[in-house]
Image: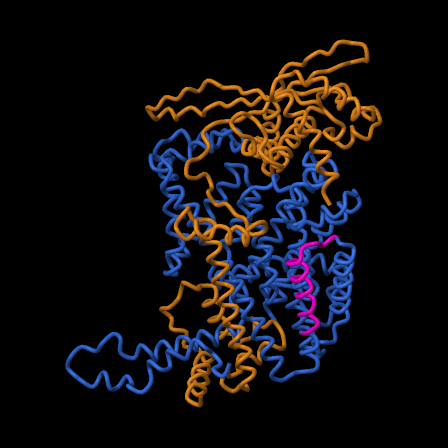
Amino acid sequence: MGERTEMMSSDSAAGARGEPGEERASTVTPSDDGARDDRARGGGPLAGGVDDDSLESVRLGALSLPARAVVAVAIGALAVYACWHLAMIFLFVAPSNTVREEHWGTVRAYMYPEFEQNWKLFAPNPLQRNTAVHARAEIREGAGQSPSTTEWIDLTAWEIDQIRHNPLPSHSNQNMLRRGWDFYEKSHNDDGEPVGMRGEVSASYLHRIALERLGDRLDLTTVERIQLRVVNTRVPAPNWRSEDFDTEPTAEELGWWTVTTEDLPADVRTSGDAAGRGAEAEGETEDADGGTEADGDTAADANDDTDGNEARP
Amino acid sequence: MTVPPPRSAPAAESGGPGGPGARNAGGPPPPSPFADLGRKFDGALLRGIGNITRRALGPYQTAIVRIGFAFTMLLYLVREWPNRGLLYGPDSPWGYDLASRFVDDTGAFTPLLWSDSALWFEFVYHLAILACVALLLGWRTRASSTLFMVGVLAVQNRSVFMGDGGDNVIHLMAMYLVLTRCGQVWSLDARRRARRAAAGVPATHDPVGVAIWAVLGVALLLSVVTGSMDSLVWTLFFAGMWAVHAFWWLVTRYAPGEPRIVSRMIGNLVHNAALLVIMFEVCVIYATAGWYKIQGSRWQDGTAVFYPLKLDYFNAWPELSDLITGSGLLVLALTYGTVIVQVAFPFALLNRRAKNVLLFLMMGEHLGIAVMLGLPFFSLAMIAMDAVFLPTVFLLWAGDRTGRIARRVTAPVARLVGRGERPAPPTEAPAPAPAPAGAERA
């Protein structure tokens, strides 16, 4: 015991005196730099005040046994936890591999939701197509009149307009519609059917975004249903390349979406005009059963959504 | 239990009885490179333990990271202030109903979903702004870093689909910063500590600190009692932070000897561990971004940079983008350069000079991305994160310059306002902004 104590103290003294081993430098650069600077200034700036000065002259070996035990336990526990945390991060971002596959449950449970991360920035390949979301609406001006359908309106174009030549673009223009569509696409299967809860909320979300953006152009209180389509256009290859892609836009239509009160932007919802809409829309949903498959699905969505909310704690 | 630093035990034995001298006794044959290894290892280990217990390392680096993220988030929240309701509040298409349903499933922590009242939303959003300001200035850094984290998590987890990579970085760093002593320098805290030390005021005489602690304690209690805070982990974390501060105060006041030393050592250890995690996180980000790119055909054929610049969403300045996308050689250089820098970064940390060069390139690239791809907040967050690797000499120089400029700018104003006559140090005392200046003197 005595031996170890001695070594500790002599060495800690050396550390405080400061032969940092200059060549050791950079793996822990900040630390090193900080420590060096600290010594240069006699321990002052680091502390920024009274108390910390004293720690510089503290010799670990001179501490009592319980004190050293506490410090040792703290070092051990922190080292173990830090290593655990780093291992989890590594496994989370690593490609599928032996260890990750076996312990994915653990990794997942630890990393979600707060440590979730994705750093495949423009990787493995950057996106090479422009995706635009268009919308059109079915409008009924008065009670007795037959509904009319608007032209397709390019919602994405408007967002792009807001981003262009703007040094500080808003997330509402950059991410809302773009990621809203991504979310919708990822949580629907190849037949366009929603997958689980995410599928349902993503459908509501996307249509609510559309309504929010249509609000500037249409009187939303007259809108009964909306339909979205997504138009993908491949970015043409650079002209200094010999590649030639098909850059024809391809469009994919979603089913008609019956607008409920919840779907409307808050200011329209509370304006009173839309008060009767909830019941009306639900009635219509039942009528619309004979529609396309997608139509029926989206309508079911809207209903589930409200039910789901009430059911949840 | 009886062997304090457990990791030194095996090393001590290996360097023990045989002794280094015995092995080298031969004379003529070249000395073994392994001779003395045990002792050197012991020495390094003890020096290391001394370093991580006695000091909270990287005071300037953690301070610049703190300032960087607080500034980024502050700028973001202020910029989005007109859109706040649309992004995170009652006007959001990601309505309270959808968000609640989603978050019930993921279990993410967000006070914004504790109530759908518009007033509550405004309160939380503006509290987040205040937390950014406080953290930026380093005012009550422990409390403000916690509130900053709460604010960041509140908005981001409320509308998770509004975020991008930049938000992701802020989210992680906001959590890590809580565990670092990031207010050691360049902060109002440091200035206050120095002034009080000069005036001989005991550290525990701190009514404001006690008041903040009490208010936060009541807030925590209310959020738990009303059932709003339903996550056990978060409840334990906040309660733990709160209890630790009470303990700290008690120890400082009533147990000046060994308990205080040990407590401060543990504080330093936590700080250093969090700093390690921050540095590792930066490496992970670049390594992941780089290694996955290597697998992409577009990064291989040297055209990858062309495409984001041509995507409508990222083509913020078409005239500028065209300058780059017009040249195949330039695009190739940027494409390969990006991959090389990102993949090389973690290894460059082994060499100080290489690290600094790459850091410079990296920050330059992020400035470019800020403008070219229209991602200023993403880039600011990345730069703030990179700053953890900035060399201290540079930070000291930059801090000094900033302090001088700030003083020059604020001195006439201060004189005008009539606050120049303070008895304290003549030039810097009146300046309200230069937390850097004050702190550096400390």
On the image, the x and y values in percent for residue B315 come to 51, 31
* Residue at x-position 41% and y-position 80%: B9
On the image, the x and y values in percent for residue B289 come to 44, 45
Q: Main secondary structure of the magenta part?
A: helix
Please state the total of marks drawn on the protein image. 0
* Residue at x-position 56% and y-position 23%: A230
- Up the image or down, B381 lies above or below B189; here it is above
In the foreground, B391 or B282: B282
The answer to whether residue B14 is left or right of residue B159 is left
In the foreground, A116 or B249: A116
Q: Which residues are magenta?
A: B228-247
On the image, the x and y values in percent for residue B389 come to 47, 58
The answer to whether residue A2 is left or right of residue B217 is left
Q: Which chain is orange?
A: A
Chain B display color: blue
For the N terminus of chain A, which image quadrant?
bottom left
